Amino acid sequence: MLNQADELFIQPYSGVKYYNKRYDILINKETALRITDMKPNKWLDTLYLINIFFNIPHYNRLNVQIQNENNDVIGYIIKEGGFFKMKDFHLFNAEKELIATIKAESKLSKLRLTILRNESEWGYSEGSLTAMDFSIMDSQTKETITVLRKRSPIYETVQENIEKGMDGYYVKTADSLEETLIRIACAISIDQHYN
């Protein structure tokens, strides 16, 4: 299903009900993939709930798996928590082989992501807190690889808009699964820093 779609919508869910962030990845408003916590930890969940009120993005840890419509794991995103230094996001394939590392640098209201593949810079993205579009640029050619668009989806009923109307990210799929996973991980990284 993933390779048949041109664009995905990453729908975040957060709050007390979910303890930690959870994401659904939609194709034509239907859930195609799910990003869920691998190792729930009540102590870390309690710290996460405290973080909701204080919004300290450096702290947020992330230890999630990306599952397809058959609940098969197709990737993992792991980020350690830390108070004083931003930690890197590590993206792994289903065999737990490192695909990419996403380094985040935040200065006041600006965020820069540097995407490393095979320990060399592959791409980057820069944006501000008020940005709605985040371009991922090729580090060598400086050309745009893709644009992640932050938007609110419009549902048919008021109830659906209230339940699911949270801002999410439209992401164009790539020819390879690995590059699509990198784009998904970049959107998750941006969401973790800005929300």
Image (cartoon, rainbow, N blue to C red):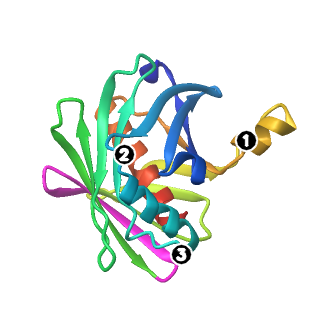
Comparing labels 1 and 2, the label whose residue is closer to the camera: 2
> Residue 33: horizontal and vertical position, in percent?
47, 28
The amino acid pointed to by label 1 is Glu
Q: Which residue is mark 2?
A: 40
Quadrant (top left, top right, bottom left, bottom right) of the C terminus? bottom right
- Badge 1 is on which residue? 163
Q: Position of residue 117 (x, y in %)?
A: 20, 50
Q: Please, is residue 46 above or below residue 11 in the view?
A: below
- Amino acid carrying label 2: it is Pro
Q: CA distance from mark 1 to mark 2?
A: 24 Å
Q: Residue at x 46, y 17 (%)?
A: 1
For disc 3, the marked residue is 54
Query: How far is disc 2 from disc 3 in space, using C-alphas?
Result: 21 Å
> CA gap, disc 3 to disc 1?
24 Å
How dense is the environment of label 2, judged by Cα within 10 Å: few (below 14), some, or many (20 and up)?
few
Q: Does residue 141 appear to the left or right of 1 in the view shown?
A: left
Q: Residues within 10 Å of mark 1 (few under 14, many from 20)?
A: few
For this rendering, which residue is in front, 173 or 39?
Answer: 39
Left or right, residue 132 beside residue 82: right
Can you see residue 160?
A: yes
> Residue at horizontal 67%, vertical 49%?
166
**Residue 53's quadrant in the figure?**
bottom right
Going from N to C along the chain, the mark reached first, 1 or 2, is: 2
Q: Secondary structure at mark 1?
A: helix
Q: Which residues are magenta?
A: 108-122
Q: Residues within 10 Å of mark 3 (few under 14, many from 20)?
A: few
Image location (x, y in percent) of residue 164: 69, 41
Q: Nearer the viewer, residue 16 or 185?
A: 16
Q: Which mark sits nearer the N-terminus, 2 or 3?
A: 2
